[in-house]
Image (cartoon, rainbow, N blue to C red):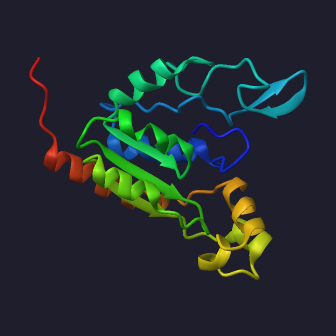
Amino acid sequence: QRRVYSRKIINLHQVISVVRKVFGPEYTVLDFDSANTPCVVNSKNCLGFYNCKLPPIESGCPVRHELIWDAGLFQNMTFLISVHGATFMNLPWIPERSHVVEIFPYGVTETCYEAYSARANLKYFRYREPNSTIYDSRFKHIPPDQCFADNQCRWETKKAPVWISTVELEKTLTQARDSYSRTCVPRQD
């Protein structure tokens, strides 16, 4: 979750709880940068590390870092679970046969990262948010499959906040976990 303004996960704490439930304590859940963690600064609500000096929800992430830090982090990932967006530009760093779960907010239809995942020998899982409430509040008059042809709809949909139905997400995460369990070869140190 590196979102400062666009596609921020409204129920991030619930999503992290579901990830922990599905994967268990043997996996480290890293909320990468926690850019949208609500915090209080001078009695004002603000979002993200640009305005806050608070640490991330999960420990281990520096507030600001360099590309080398990103590459090192992604080179050690087994799973990447993220909302569709620029985080997936880090796919070149992820080891082959790692698992990727891309979360599509309602109305977002681009699938470029699925093709890249296949070329990079990553196991790809798509989760499409079924709840249209946020989309409908802005663009009920435009069918979701036509939104990206409309510049305003496309822009507004890509920057809108995201509510993730954790019950539905859990099903996709369970499929990804089970797939990894069938293909994982433990390291012999």
Left or right, 113 with reference to 51 = left
Count numbered badges in the picture.
0
Looking at the image, residue 120 lies above or below residue 61: below
Q: Residue 91 in the image: state x and y as whole percent.
A: 40, 40
Left or right, 1 with reference to 184 = right
Q: Residue at (60%, 36%) from the top-left corner?
A: 2
Q: Residue 94 in the image: state x and y as whole percent.
A: 34, 35
Front position in the image: 54 or 109 = 109
Looking at the image, residue 170 lies above or below residue 183: below
Looking at the image, residue 124 lies above or below residue 58: below
Q: Residue 55 in the image: state x and y as whole percent.
A: 64, 19
Image quadrant in which the C terminus is located: top left
Q: Residue 169 in the image: state x and y as whole percent.
A: 45, 58
Left or right, 45 with reference to 119 = right
Q: Residue at (66%, 33%) from the top-left corner?
A: 35
For the view shown, which residue lies furthest in the right direction? 43
Q: Residue at (47%, 44%) from the top-left corner?
A: 88
Q: Residue at (71%, 25%) from the top-left corner?
A: 49
